[in-house]
Image (tube, rainbow, N blue to C red):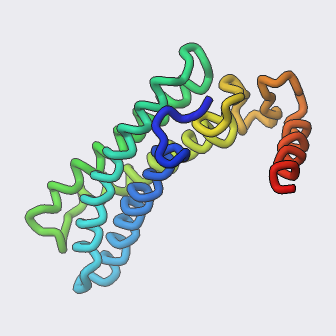
């Protein structure tokens, strides 16, 4: 199934997620540097990265919700998408809670905002993997013939397609042949 929210033919949600993921992860890295070098600007940079990451996360969530609503009910993709979306709402909530706790003293955030940020990044790693499972394994948002009930990539089983071929390499070869015909 293809994405419902597109810009110039490309899904919007995957275009937006690198920004909040990068900003929020980098904020934790800068906080770590600030613990080693407390007189530098690192905590203040983390403060602004957190703010921008939360705004970016909210924007990405809107388009993720649009795409999730289009996934057929009762499929593995719908369940994975739910866990992905709810988990990311929790990530944004953790950072949204961390950020105002830093307002008084952005250069010295204290333990609670730092713990919330580290928990948020840890959870973002899990939800990011779930997002990868949706796109790379299940084909959500990118493949009109997506296999929305493919087994987990951790199962060791091949993903099968709705085209009837049971060997994913057959699909890969067909794609290569189609690609060559387009190029030639």
Quadrant of image for the N terminus = top right
Looking at the picture, does residue 53 appear above or below residue 2? below
Q: Position of residue 24 (x, y in %)?
A: 37, 59
Q: Position of residue 137 (x, y in %)?
A: 69, 38
Q: 46 or 55: which is nearer to us?
A: 55
Seen from this angle, which residue lies furthest top? 74
Quadrant of image for the C terminus = bottom right
Rendered image quadrant of residue 130: top right
Q: Residue at x 57, y 45 (%)?
A: 129
> Is residue 91 rendered to the left or right of residue 129?
left
Q: Residue at x 24, y 66 (%)?
A: 48
Looking at the picture, does residue 67 appear above or below residue 135? above
> Is residue 104 rendered to the left or right of residue 115?
left
Rendered image quadrant of residue 51: bottom left
Rendered image quadrant of residue 144: top right
Q: Residue at x 80, y 29 (%)?
A: 160
Looking at the picture, does residue 161 appear above or below residue 101? above
Q: Position of residue 15 (x, y in %)?
A: 48, 52
> Is residue 132 rendered to the left or right of residue 107?
right
């Amino acid at each position: 199934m293809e994405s419902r929210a597109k810009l110039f033919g490309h899904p919007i949600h995957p275009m937006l997620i690198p920004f909040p993921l990068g900003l929020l992860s980098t904020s934790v890295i800068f906080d770590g540097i600030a613990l080693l070098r407390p007189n530098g600007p690192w905590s203040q940079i983390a403060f602004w990265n957190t703010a921008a990451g939360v705004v970016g996360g909210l924007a990405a969530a809107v388009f993720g919700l649009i795409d999730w609503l289009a996934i057929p009910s009762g499929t593995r993709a719908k369940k994975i998408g739910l866990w992905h979306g709810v988990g990311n709402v929790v990530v944004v909530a953790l950072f949204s809670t961390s950020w105002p706790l830093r307002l008084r003293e952005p250069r010295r955030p204290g333990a609670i905002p730092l713990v919330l940020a580290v928990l948020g990044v840890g959870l973002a790693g899990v939800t990011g993997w779930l997002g990868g499972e949706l796109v790379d394994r299940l084909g959500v948002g990118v493949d009109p013939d997506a296999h929305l009930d493919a087994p987990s990539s951790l199962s060791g089983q091949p993903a099968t397609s709705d085209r009837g071929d049971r060997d994913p390499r057959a699909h890969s070869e067909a794609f290569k042949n189609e690609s060559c015909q387009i190029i030639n």
